[in-house]
Amino acid sequence: MSANKKTSMKVEILGEAYVLRTEAAPEHTKAVAEYLDKAIRQILSGGTVIEANRAAILAALQITSELFLAREANGTLVGSMQGLSADVRRLLPPGKREGALI
C-alpha cells in the first residue's frame, strides 16, 4: 500500500465538475484533466463527432496511443543506454568494470 495520502480535488472537463481522490500532486491532476479536456474538445471541433461520450472514447484511444508510443520510445532508449553502458564498461580497467554504474 502506498504511503502517500489521497486528497480530493475538483477538476472540470467539458464544463462538468468532477471530484477526484488521488495521491498525485494537484498540479499534475489539473494538468491531466486539462489535457483530456483539450483532446475531447479537439475531436468535437472536428465536426464528425457530436456526442461528448463518443468524443471522450476517441480522446481516450488517442491518449492511450500516445502512451504506448512513449513506452516504446522509452524501451528503445533504455536499450540504447544499456548498450552504451556495456561498451563503456569494456573500456574501463578490469578492476573497475564490475562496480561501474555507467
Image (cartoon, grey):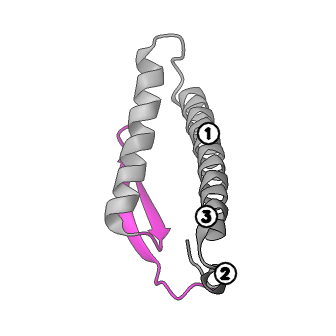
Judging by the rendered image, the residue that carries numbered circle 3 is 85
Foreground of the two, 85 or 4: 85
In the image, taking residue 61 as reference, residue 18 lies left or right, namely left
What is the secondary structure assignment of the residue under circle 2? helix
Foreground of the two, 20 or 43: 43
Looking at the rendered image, the quarter that the C terminus falls into is: bottom right
> Looking at the image, which residue sits at the far front?
93
In the image, taking residue 8 as reference, residue 87 lies left or right, namely right
Q: Earlier in the sequence, mark 3 or mark 1?
A: 1
Looking at the rendered image, the quarter that the N terminus falls into is: bottom right
> Looking at the image, which residue sits at the far left?
27
Judging by the rendered image, the residue that carries numbered circle 2 is 94
Q: Position of residue 44 (x, y in %)?
A: 45, 21
Say which quarter of the image contains residue 82: bottom right
Q: How many marks?
A: 3
Q: Position of residue 85 (x, y in %)?
A: 61, 64
Q: Amino acid at mark 3?
A: Ser
